[in-house]
Amino acid sequence: MSQSGPLSDPLSEPRRNLVGIGRAELAAEMAESGAEPFRARQLWHWIYHRGVTDFAAMSNLAKGFRERLAATYELGRPAISSALASADGTRKWLLRFGDGQEVETVHIPESDRGTLCVSSQVGCTLTCSFCHTGTQRLVRNLTSAEIVAQIMVARDALGEWPKPASATSPATPVGEDRQLTNIVLMGMGEPLYNYENVAAALKIAMDPEGLSISRRKITLSTAGVVPAIARCGAELGVNLAVSLHAVTDELRDRLVPLNRKYPIAELLGACRTYPGSSNARRITFEYVMLKGVNDSPADARELVRLLQGIPAKVNLIPFNPWPGAPYECPTDAVIAAFSDIMFAAGYSAPVRTPRGRDILAACGQLKSESVRARRTAPAPAPSA
């Protein structure tokens, strides 16, 4: 390849961010610039395996080529508007993108894994009545780059990138004890209403020569966008989680308004045929426990009946309060009785331990801090 001349005129256009573009697009970008094909593979390694944020760190590229890359492209991350740490070790980042919009991303450490809860939209269109995010209007979908960037910011903060060799020490790979092992698309937004961008981001995340997160370690949660469920299973093969929360259409219509479009029978039909589901790869049904609403023994028995024939497990989620919430959490005894009925029927139904409640990072509590701030700020004084 000839490395003479700039890749493009840096004065004629803004630098393009290479973080978040897929293999084919990166290869096309380099080919258009006149670079040899192996340059795209080198860049992919540095961006997604090494996590570098400066072209100057790409030591196996010629200095002149690195300088031309830096003049044309960038390796940007969203700004961190705030970073909070819970008493239980949960961490939450409020990330701000170039247009000023913000989302929250949460890391939940456990003894055997570290799970990153990733957002797919700014706000949400579903208005589920028990969910804090649902009180924030949908602003826009996140791009694939903005979804991937959440993983990369978390790896930055956790020190999860392989450390390069130095004059005094050999290179340090990321080991099996890494802190970020699992991804759940359970943050702000409905992932299947932003399928194309979510799919593109997950393909980058799963690439074995990049972020290298196994599809078996990735779970996509949906409130029940039935037409996209089969496509998700066929094209991505990730684990599926379904936000169920009720055993009758009458109640679910109120809790999850999307049910009016895709009722329970239709949703469970899509789950029964989800590609790849089996006893080894069960579908997770999320069930937020709401005091006096969906927590009775009769509800538990009906849930057992509904799930017959589906390789399933149930996550029972104690309701996590948020300011102005219209619901309360049942007592531990009520939740335990519900769980016992499920276990007795052969379904795993663990009670999820609330994590990060003190920083509003628990399930159903995410909401852009910028929105909360705008709503609580004093009104401007009238102009004269």
Image: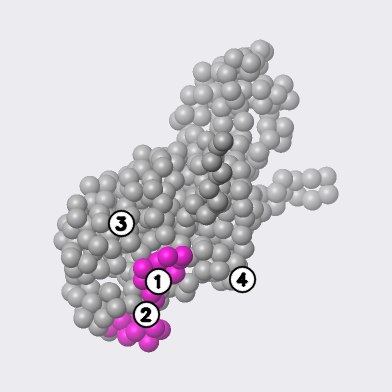
Q: Would you say 319 lies left or right of 166 here?
A: left
| Amino acid type of the residue that numbered disc 1 sits on in the rendered structure | Phe
Q: Which residue is mark 4?
A: 87
| Amino acid type of the residue that numbered disc 2 sits on in the rendered structure | Pro
Q: Nearer the viewer, residue 327 or 300?
A: 327
Q: Which of the two labelled residues, at mark 2 and mark 1, occupies the earlier sequence position?
A: 1
Q: Residue furthest right?
A: 168
Q: Which of the two labelled residues, at mark 1 and mark 3, occupies the earlier sequence position?
A: 3
Q: CA distance from mark 4 to mark 1?
A: 19 Å
Could you tell me residue 251's position as x and y percent? 22, 67
Q: Residue at x 60, y 36 (%)?
A: 76
**Picture colour scheme:** one colour
Q: Which residue is mark 3?
A: 223
Q: Which of the two labelled residues, at mark 2 and mark 4, occupies the earlier sequence position?
A: 4
Q: Which residues are magenta?
A: 319-341
What is the quadrant of the N terminus in the image? top right
Q: CA distance from mark 2 to mark 3?
A: 22 Å
Q: CA distance from mark 2 to mark 1?
A: 8 Å
